[in-house]
Image (cartoon, rainbow, N blue to C red):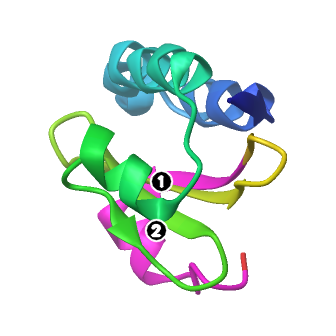
């Protein structure tokens, strides 16, 4: 898969020293996603069982032992993953994962 907006992850890590614990798990997710070939949401669930599949290609991943949430939009036909949001559970509760 091609992952768009690694800068979104980097900006989150840089925003606060308390988010530094997301660097390792976030980069692990990124590397694993680069190697993936997801053709359907079922492929995502097979690789990341704890991922939440939403409508219209949206997926929510738990990062760093479920401390952070990562929302992506996946274009399965073109094998592209767009990072839309990363944040704490409290930050996640303040967004609409379907529209962000």
| Residue 5 placement: quadrant | top right
Give percent across and percent down for residue 65.
Answer: 15, 38
Q: Quadrant of the C terminus?
A: bottom right
Q: Nearer the viewer, residue 95 or 82?
A: 82
Disc 2 is placed on an element classified as helix
Q: Which mark is residue 79?
A: none
> Compared with residue 6, is residue 62 higher up or lower down, i.e. above or below?
below
In magenta, the rendered stretch is 82-99
Q: Nearer the viewer, residue 73 or 27?
A: 73
Q: Nearer the viewer, residue 91 or 81?
A: 81
Give percent across and percent down for residue 94.
Answer: 50, 83
Give percent across and percent down for residue 32.
Answer: 45, 19
> Compared with residue 38, is residue 6 higher up or lower down, i.e. above or below?
above
Give percent across and percent down for residue 38.
Answer: 55, 43
Q: Is residue 92 magenta?
A: yes
Q: Quadrant of the N terminus?
A: top right
The residue identified by callout 2 is: 91
| Residue 69 placement: quadrant | bottom left
Q: Residue at x 52, y 26 (%)?
A: 36
On screen, residue 24 versus residue 34, left or right, reads left
Q: Residue at x 31, y 54 (%)?
A: 45
Mark 2 → mark 1, Cα distance in angstroms:
6 Å
Disc 1 is placed on an element classified as strand
The outermost residue toward the left is 65
> Compared with residue 97, is residue 29 higher up or lower down, i.e. above or below?
above
Q: Residue at x 77, y 42 (%)?
A: 80
Q: Which mark is residue 87?
A: 1
Q: Circle 2: is it few (<14), some (14-19), or many (20+) Cα within 10 Å?
A: few
* Contact between labelled residues 1 and 2, with CB atoms less than 8 Å apart: yes
Q: Is residue 16 magenta?
A: no
Q: Circle 1: is it few (<14), some (14-19), or many (20+) Cα within 10 Å?
A: some
| Residue 28 placement: quadrant | top left
């Amino acid at each position: 898969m091609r992952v768009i907006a690694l800068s979104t992850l980097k900006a989150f890590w840089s925003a606060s020293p308390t988010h530094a614990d997301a660097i390792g798990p976030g980069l692990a997710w990124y590397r694993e996603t680069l190697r993936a070939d997801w053709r359907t949401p079922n492929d995502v669930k097979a690789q990341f069982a704890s991922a939440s599949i939403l409508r219209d290609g949206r997926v929510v991943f738990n990062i760093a032992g479920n401390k952070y949430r990562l929302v992506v939009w996946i274009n399965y036909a073109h094998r592209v993953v767009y990072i839309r949001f990363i944040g704490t559970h409290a930050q996640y509760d303040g967004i609409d994962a379907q529209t962000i």
